[in-house]
Amino acid sequence: MKKARILGCLVFFLCQVWGWGQRQTERPYWFSLERGKSLFRKGDYGNALLAFEDARRDRRARYTRMEQDLIDLLSMPEVRLLGDSLAQIEPYIAERYQVNAGAALREVYFRVSRESLEGSAAKALEVLGRLKNYPEAEYWIGESYRVEGELAVALMQYEKAHEQRAFLENPGFDIEILYKIVDILKIRQNYTEMEKRLLEILEQDTLWSGEINKNTKSVMLRMLENEGISRFLTVYRYNNTLVERAHRLLGLYYYTSGRHNRAVQHLMFSFLIQNTIVIEEVIRNQYDFTFTDLENLWIQVMKRPVLVDYIEGAEYYRTIYYLGAALYGDGKLIPARRFWSFLSGCLDAGEWGGRASSQLRSPFVEHVVEMP
């Protein structure tokens, strides 16, 4: 009995490998996706869109066929007698050389853990149904429409890609999709939905989310307000770049809508992440560097083009200005002036240095109609 079982499993495995080899003669759906990306980068958006649609269609056809192969097997009278048990069905596949059904199951096992199926053939069939979706293709179709100015269609595609995120090849890519959704919602001034999506991104921020971190955030804020910027950046470091922009956008949104305390909290996190990235990069190139204050750090930044580019892309000066403005709006003039004083002394701060100087002379709460 044991030898027969081992032999059956071996045959099952060989059938799966044979089926896998057969499938390689088909046009891979991922090949069409990569071709579309190449065309997209070259600015050939029309043909890129066609390639992305081919990728979506090819994937759907592949898994539809696999789904039907498994349905055909499960519909056989002798297999129906075996019930829903994969443990009973797999030996049957091996013994009867059901190559197509074996290939379908192999694909399921490759995509999800066997444990998640709980030994159920119905659940394996359900996975094949969901695998017809191709979130990466939906995303790139959205990108193609976005660059052509079709924002409504692009938004619909991004939403579809995010709904299908469970089967992303790169699980962390769902954050990128959410940011694309946020960008369109911001352009369309749908700020309520934008806020919801940004908060969804921050669910990935382990230092921010959760009841246990409320006290930590309060301690951080008190240190920033009472002990100053230098002490704050000496004690705390946080390099979660994935969520920095979400904190920054939420901080600006809350400031614009007059919720200054909430704006302070998010802009504080954005400021902390930005400076952590800068400090870590300086140390990477100058191991004996020790952070003392923002002025000293700024001197180091100006020596390194890569950091100059980074602070421009991260809206470093703008973040600092509005963090000061939010602190002032929350009734914290002294810490607000610390940020404005730093900005007013930065020759490269441009508009934000000028606005900081004006605030130092006569501080006021800006009445903004739209998000800055």
Image (cartoon, rainbow, N blue to C red):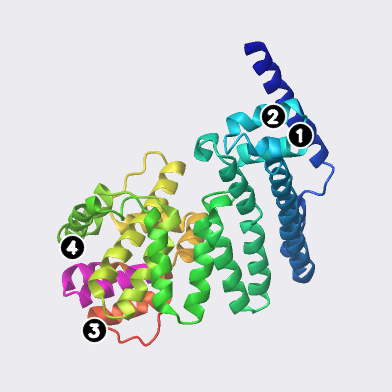
The residue that disc 2 covers is 92
Q: Amino acid at mark 3?
A: Phe
- What x and y, as percent, mark residue 196? 39, 69
Q: Are marks 4 and 2 in contact (CB under 8 Å)?
A: no
- What x and y, as percent, mark residue 160? 58, 65
Quadrant for the C terminus, please.
bottom left
The residue that disc 1 covers is 98
Q: Are marks 2 and 1 in contact (CB under 8 Å)?
A: yes
Residue 143 visible within the image: yes
Badge 3 marks a residue whose secondary structure is loop
The residue that disc 3 covers is 364
Q: Are marks 3 and 1 in contact (CB under 8 Å)?
A: no
Density class for disc 3 (Cα within 10 Å; few <14, some 14-19, many ≥20) is few
Badge 2 marks a residue whose secondary structure is helix
Badge 1 marks a residue whose secondary structure is loop
Mark pair 4, 2: CA separation? 70 Å
| Residue under the image location 69 percent in, 35 percent down | 78
Q: Earlier in the sequence, mark 1 or mark 4?
A: 1
Magenta-tinted stretch: 318-338
Quadrant for the N terminus, please.
top right
| Residue under the image location 24 percent in, 48 percent down | 235
Q: Amino acid at mark 4?
A: Glu
The residue that disc 4 covers is 225
